[in-house]
Image (cartoon, grey):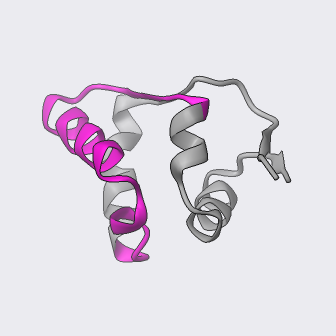
Amino acid sequence: MARKYKFQLPYEVNSFYVGFGIGQLKAEGLFDKLPKDLQDRFNEAADAWQSVTITKDECDEIDDDTWTKLADKLDLAWSK
């Protein structure tokens, strides 16, 4: 069953939070569980102090366990 996101998509992660977020996700073992292309985009954005915009398709590519932890951490509402 597809997830239903209850927040505005595409979702923008502000440049201020990108680097901080990467550090937090790595500390919790979640960053390496993100799809490789998303990891690359976050790393490139952190290096350039840019925001990252995440699409519905990219959210859908994140496995359920990782998504649940990530959504809870970011306070993003969703349902199955």
Residue at 51% across, 38% down: 58
The answer to whether 20 is drawn above or below residue 31 in the figure is: above
19 falls in the magenta region: no
Left or right: 70, with 20 as reference point: right
Q: Give the camera-side residue of 22 and 65.
A: 65
Q: Which residues are magenta?
A: 27-56
The answer to whether 62 is drawn above or below residue 7 in the figure is: below
Left or right: 49, with 57 as reference point: left
Where, by quadrant of the figure, is residue 25 drawn? Answer: bottom left
Where, by quadrant of the figure, is residue 46 drawn? Answer: top left
Q: Position of residue 3 (x, y in %)?
A: 77, 47
Q: Residue furthest right?
A: 79
Left or right: 34, with 11 as reference point: left
Residue at 40% across, 53% down: 21
The answer to whether 37 is drawn above or below residue 64 in the figure is: above
50 falls in the magenta region: yes
The answer to whether 36 is drawn above or below residue 16 in the figure is: below
Q: Position of residue 44 (x, y in %)?
A: 18, 36
Residue at 38% across, 53% down: 35
Q: Position of residue 76 (x, y in %)?
A: 71, 46
Q: How many marks?
A: 0
Where, by quadrant of the figure, is residue 24 drawn? Answer: bottom left
Q: Main secondary structure of the magenta part?
A: helix
Q: Residue furthest front?
A: 1
Q: Residue furthest left?
A: 47
Left or right: 39, with 78 as reference point: left
Residue at 35% across, 44% down: 38
